[in-house]
């Protein structure tokens, strides 16, 4: 009886006016190749993510962020945060 654990990014979504990138990661536990458990974790990537933090994301997520987090979006989001007092 062999147990294995696999972590996969099974959903990447672009959400909202400021193009938040939402990443869902699934942890799959298998016994002898048959899935017995699956759990999820989500995290959101804001347009103002640092280059160092973005480098910790998968190549696919990095490419999506680089495509949707334009300078206009970054500026608009920074202005939004400033107006919120954050």
Image: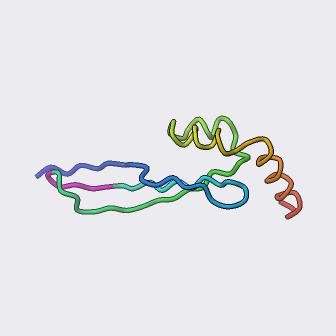
Query: In this image, 75 relative to 47: left or right?
Result: right
Q: Residue at x 46, y 55 (%)?
A: 11
Q: Which quadrant holds the C terminus?
A: bottom right
Question: Residue 49: x and y, percent?
Answer: 69, 44
Of the pair 77 and 28, the residue shown nearer to us: 77
Question: Residue 15: x and y, percent?
Answer: 63, 59
Q: Residue at x 63, y 51 (%)?
A: 45
Of the pair 32 and 17, the residue shown nearer to us: 17
Q: Residue at x 10, y 52 (%)?
A: 1
Of the pair 14 and 56, the residue shown nearer to us: 14
Question: Residue 40: x and y, percent?
Answer: 42, 61
Q: Which residue in the rendered view is the most extreme toward the left?
A: 1
Query: In this image, 81 relative to 63: left or right?
Result: right
Stretch in magenta: 28-32
Color encoding of the figure: rainbow
Magenta-span inclusion, residue 50:
no
Query: In this image, 80 relative to 47: left or right?
Result: right
């Amino acid at each position: 009886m062999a147990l294995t654990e696999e972590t996969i990014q099974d959903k990447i979504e672009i959400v909202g006016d400021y193009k938040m990138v939402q990443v869902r990661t699934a942890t799959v536990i298998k016994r002898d190749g048959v899935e017995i458990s699956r759990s999820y974790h989500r995290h959101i990537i804001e347009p103002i993510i640092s280059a160092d933090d973005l480098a910790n994301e998968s190549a696919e997520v990095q490419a999506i962020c680089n495509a949707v987090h334009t300078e206009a979006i970054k500026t608009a989001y920074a202005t939004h945060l400033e107006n919120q007092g954050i």
